Image (cartoon, coloured by chain):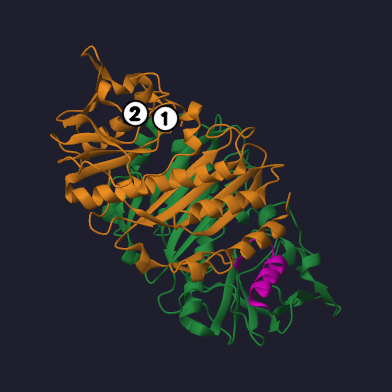
Chain colours: A green, B orange
Amino acid sequence: MSTESELLRHVYERSAGLERRFPIVIAGPGDDCAGLRAQDLGAVALAKVDQLVEGRHYDPETTPIDLIARKAVCRAISDIAAMGGRPLAALVGAALRDGFAHENALFDALRRSAESFDCPLVGGDIARVGGPTVIAVAVLGAAHPVRGFVGRRGAKPGDGVFVTGRLGNSLASGRHLTFEPRLREGAWLCDALGRRLTAMMDVSDGLGRDAGRLAAASGVRITIDAMSIPRHDDCPDWRRAATDGEDYELLFTASASPPPDCPTGVPVTRIGLVEEGRGCFITAPGGSDLDAADMGWEHGA
Amino acid sequence: MSTESELLRHVYERSAGLERRFPIVIAGPGDDCAGLRAQDLGAVALAKVDQLVEGRHYDPETTPIDLIARKAVCRAISDIAAMGGRPLAALVGAALRDGFAHENALFDALRRSAESFDCPLVGGDIARVGGPTVIAVAVLGAAHPVRGFVGRRGAKPGDGVFVTGRLGNSLASGRHLTFEPRLREGAWLCDALGRRLTAMMDVSDGLGRDAGRLAAASGVRITIDAMSIPRHDDCPDWRRAATDGEDYELLFTASASPPPDCPTGVPVTRIGLVEEGRGCFITAPGGSDLDAADMGWEHGA
C-alpha cells in the first residue's frame, strides 16, 4: 500500500506531458484544480458524474483491476455517448477500501482507459475508507457541434423508438465489464438525423425502466413491441431483455428512421412507438400491454 | 429512506427552473449529462473533484446534515478559490451508508450551499454502500479573466510567502465545518497583483506540508518564520499552526506585497521567503531550521 505522497508521485510522473498530448489540457494533476482550454468544450459543455461501487457494480474477488477501472470510466463515457457528445477530460474521486493495495495499478488503468477515448485524466482525489471501494468518475465533454444537446425531453407522438445493439444478460455474461460506450453510434445518429433525433439516453437500469424515464421526461407514452427487442443469444427471453440492466446501449426516439447501416456495424432496431399519453408499456407476444413500471425493480436510492 | 425514484423526483422538482436562475445551465438534473454554456467558463475552465468521508472529515454523530453538505461543497470550492477562480457549476456523487435516511435533506443542503456561491448543482449520482458515506463533489469554474490559471509551479527565488487569515486548531474548534472559502480574497489577489502573484494553493493538510508541496512543484526552497505564522487565539503554539490541517486559507507567493487592506477584512500575512534550493523549512524561535517534511503527518493514500 502506497503512502499518499508515493501515490501522488506516481500520478504526477505518469501525468507528465499531458498538456503536449492533449491540447485541451492547460494544467493536469498537481495543482488545486485542473485547467482546461474552455473553447475546446465547444458551444455546449457536457458534465456527468457516475459512481462504481465494489460489490454492487463489480465483484472484487473475480474482477481484474483493469476491468474495474474500465467499467468506472466507461459508465461515465456512456452518458456522454447518450448525448451524441465527445468526452474531453475526466476526474476521479476514489474512496479505496482500507487495505486495497493496487492504487498505482488502478490509477494507471483508469488513465489508460480514459485516454483510449481521447479523454485525459486531469485530476482526482484519493481517500481511504472502512468499507467498499467507491470510484466516482466525472467526465467533461462537448455536445455534438451541429445537433447540440440531446436530452430525454424531446420525444413526440409519432416518433419511432429505437435501440442500438442487443440487450439482456449483461451481468451473467460479463458484458457489463467489457461493453463499448456507443460514442461513434451516438455521434452518427446526430450527424444522420439532426433535429429528427428527438431524444436519447443510455440503457443502464433495464430497457423498460429507462424507456419509462424517457417517456416521463418527454410527457409521452412509449409502447414497445416485446418481440422486436433485439437480445443477445445468451439472453433467454424478451422479458429479461426488457428488464436486465447494465446494457449501456443507446435508446432513442426519432421522427425518421436512421439510415440502414451504422458505419460501426452495430445494429439499430426499431422497437416501438411514441404516442400521446403517459408511461411505458410493453406489448407481450399474446397482445396484452404490460406496464413497464411493474416489470422492473426498485431499489432504495 | 427514499427509494431511488422518490429521491430523483425530489431532486428534479427542486431543480426545476435552474436554467432561468443560472444562465450557464442549458440542462440540469434529469438527462444523462448536464449541459453548460461553455463560453461562460471563460478562457480557462477549472475542474476539481474532492471527497468528504464520514468519520474522517466529519463525525456523523454530532454533525448536522447542513454542515456535512456545506463542508463537502466548500472543500471543492476552496480549490477554485486557490486558483483565483470563480465556481460555476457542481456535480455530486454520493455513496450513502445503508440506512442513511436523510437523502432529501442532504441534497437540499448541498444545493443550497453550492448556490450560495452562485454555483448551481447540475447533476449527480446516488449509490448505497455498506460502509461510510462518501460525498464526492466535482466543481467547474472559470479562471481569473486577466491573471489566468494560478498554479503551484510559479514561485521564484526572492518572492515573499504569504497566507490569508489565521491557522491552527480547525478540527477541535469546529472551524473545519464553518470556514469560508477564500473566493473573494483569491480574486482580489489576482486583481491586485496580476503576474506578480506567482503561485497559490489552499492550506488543507497543514501549512508546512502544503508549503512543501508548493516548493516541490516550483523547484524552490521555502523558509517560513515560525513566529510570523498568524494563528487563531485558541491555537496554542506555532507548531500547531504549522501542522494542523483543514484551515482552507490561501498560501501564496508573490514578487511584490499585496496592498495592505483586503476588502473583505481578512488579514494577509507575510510568513516567509522563497529561495534557491529544495524543501520547506521553518525557522523556530531559537533560530534552528526545521524540515517541514519531518513535522507533518503522512497517512496511507
Q: Quadrant of residue A133?
A: top right
Comparing marks 2 and 1, which lies closer to the viewer? 1
Q: Give the image quarter of residue B135.
A: top right
Residue sitting nearer the eye, A141 or B162:
B162
Distance CA(mark 2)–CA(mark 1)? 9 Å
Q: From the top left corner, tell me how far across and down residue B274 is, in percent.
A: 18, 32
Please, what secondary structure does the residue beneath circle 1 have? loop
Q: Which residues are magenta?
A: A202-219
Query: Does residue A79 lie above or below B178 as drawn?
Result: below
> Three-letter amino acid code at disc 1?
Gly
The x, y position of residue A34, in whole percent, is 35, 50
Please say whether residue A211 is one of the residues in the magenta stretch: yes
Q: Position of residue B41 (x, y in %)?
A: 36, 62
Q: Residue at x 44, y 26 (%)?
A: B169
Q: Residue at x 13, y 34 (%)?
A: B158
Q: Secondary structure at mark 2?
A: helix
Left or right of B133: which side holds B140? left
Identify the subunit bearing mark 2.
B
**In this rendering, is residue A151 above or below A69?**
below
Q: Amino acid at mark 2?
A: Arg
* Badge 1: chain ID: B
Towards the viewer: B48 or A58: B48
Question: Going 35% across and 27% down the picture, which residue do you hit?
Answer: B231
Is circle 2 on the same chain as circle 1? yes
* Circles 2 and 1: CB atoms closer than 8 Å: yes
Q: In the drawing, what numbered circle is on residue B245?
A: 1
Q: Where is mark 2, residue-wise? A: B209
Label 2 CA crowd tier, 10 Å (few <14, some 14–19, many 20+): many
Q: Nearer the viewer, residue A107 or B235?
A: B235
Q: What secondary structure prevails in the magenta region?
A: helix
